[in-house]
Image (cartoon, rainbow, N blue to C red):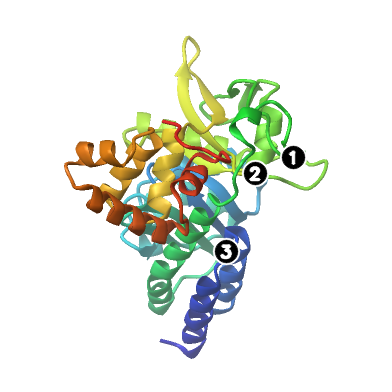
Amino acid sequence: MRRSHAHARDAIERICRRGGESRALRQDVLEQLRHSVGFDWYVWMLTDPATSVGVDPVAHVPDLLSLPTTIRLKYLTTLNRWTSLTVAANLAERAAESDLWSEVQRPLGVIDVASVALRDPWGCWGFLDLWSTTRYAADDLALLRVVAPVLTTALRDARAAQFRTVAVPLDQVGSGSGRSSGSPRIDQGPAVVLLDDGLSIVGQTTASDELLAMLLPGAPGVPPVPAAVYNVAAALVASEAGVDQSPPMARVPVADGVWLTLRASRITPGAVIAVTIEPSSPADRLDVFARAHGLSERERELLTLLAGGADTRQIAASMLVSRHTVQDHLKSIFAKTGTHTRRVLLSHVLGVAGASSGL
C-alpha cells in the first residue's frame, strides 16, 4: 500500500473512532480520500438499512438540473449497484455497460467511478460513488475495501445516536406545545409529492414544503433539494423495471427525535408517481432502532413485545423462556443501547418522553 494510502487509512480509522454526526464525519473522510484516491465529484448517500433506498446525501455533482435523471439512472443501472456490490469496485473497461455513465457522466468527462457499498449483517447503511476524470488504480480500490467496514460501523453508530434525542411528551405530540420552531408539524396527515416518470415534480401538497425542508435543509431562501423524494421514486421505477425488488420506502430522522417515512406508489389513471411523507410508525422506528444498535433476533423479539406493553411474565411466556432469561436479554439490550431502564429504552425507540408502550 502506498504511503499516502496508509496515511489515509489510519486517518479515516481515527475519524471513525471519534464518531459524531454523520454529515461532518463523511466530509472529514472525503477530505482524506481526496488526497489519497483522488476524485472530481462525489455522492455519499445514507440509506434505509432494510430497503437500501437513499435518504441523506452529502454530494458534489456538476449539474443539479440533471439530478432527477442522475438518480433515476443510478437506480436503473445494475453495474456496481450498491445493493449487490460486495464491497468496492470501479467501472474501468465496463463503463459502457452503465447507462448512468453513458448518459450523464461521460459527457462531463468522467472516465471512471469507484463505488463502495457500506453494508453489515444489520443492513445497508449507505453507498459512496467517487467520479473521476482519470482511471482508478488497483491500490485505490484496495484502500476503499480496507476502510469500508469501519465506515459502515461509524455510519450505523451515527444512526443509533439519532435515537437519543427524544421528542415532546406523548400528550403534546402534534399539539404545537413543547415543539421547537424547527420541528415539523405531525398532526396534518401525510404530505404528498407527485412526480412523472422522469422524476420531475409535477405537484405537491402544501404540507410537503416544511417536511422537504426538514429532510435536507438548505441555505436560507434556497428551495430544498428533494433528494429523498427522488430516491424513493427512483426505487419504485427500478422495482417496476425488475432491477431491484426492495420496497420503495425509506425512513429518515429529521429534528427533535422525529423520524419520517417516505413511500412511493403509482396513481392511476395517468401513471403519476406519488411519494407520501409522514411520521414513522412505532414499528418502523423499532426496526431501524434494532438494526442500528445491532440487536439479535431474540433481542428484537423481546423489544417488540416490550414496546407492545408486555410485562416480564408475558414476555417470558411468549418467548418460551424463563423470567431470568428475559432479564438477561434486557441487560444485553441496555448495554447495546446505552440505556438503563425500560422507560428510557422505550422513549428512545418510540421518540416520546415517558413512553411505556406504543405498538
Residue where numbered disc 2 is placed: 256
Q: Say above or below: 299 vs 136.
A: above
Q: Residue 217 placed where, x, y %?
A: 70, 45
Q: Residue furthest bottom?
A: 3
Q: Residue 32 placed where, x, y %?
A: 57, 75
User: Considering the numbered disc 3 on the image, is that residue within a helix, a strand or a loop?
Assistant: helix
Residue ID at (56%, 35%): 229
Residue 26 tag number: 3
Q: Quadrant of residue 312?
A: top left
Q: Is residue 108 left or right of residue 3?
A: right
Q: Is residue 40 visible?
A: no
Q: Quadrant of residue 228?
A: top right
Residue where numbered disc 1 is placed: 180
Q: What is the C-alpha distance between the residues marked 3 and 2? A: 22 Å
Q: Quadrant of the C terminus?
A: top left
Q: Residue furthest left?
A: 320
User: Considering the numbered disc 2 on the image, is that residue within a helix, a strand or a loop?
Assistant: loop
Q: What is the C-alpha distance between the residues marked 3 and 1? A: 27 Å
The kind of residue on which mark 3 rests is: Arg
User: Considering the numbered disc 1 on the image, is that residue within a helix, a strand or a loop?
Assistant: loop
Q: Residues within 10 Å of mark 2 (few under 14, many from 20)?
A: some
Q: Say above or below: 289 vs 171.
A: below
